[in-house]
Amino acid sequence: MRWFDSPLRCELNEVIMASTLYTEMIDRAKSAADMHDGFPSIPTWLYFLNAELRKLWVKIVRGGYPITVNQEVITSTGAAQYDITEPFAVLSVVEVIGDRYYNVPVKPVWSTYRAATGSHAKEVYVFPNVSTGELSFRFYPTPPTGNVFLVNIIDKPKKIVSGTPGTNESNSVQLPFGWEERVVLGMAQRALA
């Protein structure tokens, strides 16, 4: 039996997610580092926490277990390109025409972009828009007005802050039970370096 056929398999979105405050994670990292004096400052600990959280996020995604998969919808208007807030990764782009779904191959380099119009997109060029901090999509051929594209993305991990959290920020880390220990041990290791 393959692992994905197993009745014991469950999606990460269904796993109970533990919420751990940043202060608790810092205290656990201090304890793990077994330091008696010369602790880093709170901003330094937060830097360690965010760096280790991003490192864990990359491992999780590369392992094929993304924690947060969301979907953005792009409705074509005949424009040359469409922008969405830059995600951590783009998993797929699917064009919906009537009751049919067409996978649109994602091309990472747009320097070979060709301009043409057609009934539906055959490929999409994805590139970062440096001026806006968004991710830009250019479809080839340019689809007619009204075509709908579903973009499956993995969101970036929220930045952990000590003050009032803003957009895409938090005071706590939400990971499946036990995974935060990887972040805590990485923080302790950085403190000792």
Image (cartoon, rainbow, N blue to C red):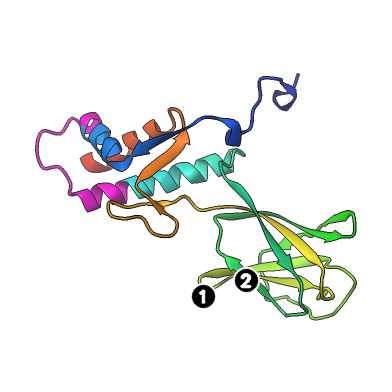
Q: Residue at x 55, y 69 (%)?
A: 134
What range of the chain is rendered magenta? 31-48
Is 39 covered by the magenta stretch?
A: yes
Seen in the picture, residue 123 relative to 118 is either above or below; the reply is: above
- Name the secondary structure under disc 2: strand
Comparing 125 with 151, the one in front is: 151
Quarter of the image containing the C terminus? Answer: top left
Residue 50: x and y in percent read 36, 49
- Name the secondary structure under disc 1: loop
Residue 142: x and y in percent read 81, 76
- Reading the image, the residue beneath label 2 is 83
Comparing 128 with 108, the one in front is: 128
Q: Is residue 125 left or right of residue 101?
A: left
Seen in the picture, residue 133 relative to 69 is either above or below; the reply is: below
User: What amino acid is at disc 2?
Assistant: Asp
Q: Is residue 142 left or right of residue 106?
A: right
Number of marks in the rendered image: 2
Q: Residue at x 54, y 55 (%)?
A: 88
Q: Is residue 40 left or right of residue 46?
A: left
User: What amino acid is at disc 1?
Assistant: Thr
Residue 53: x and y in percent read 41, 44
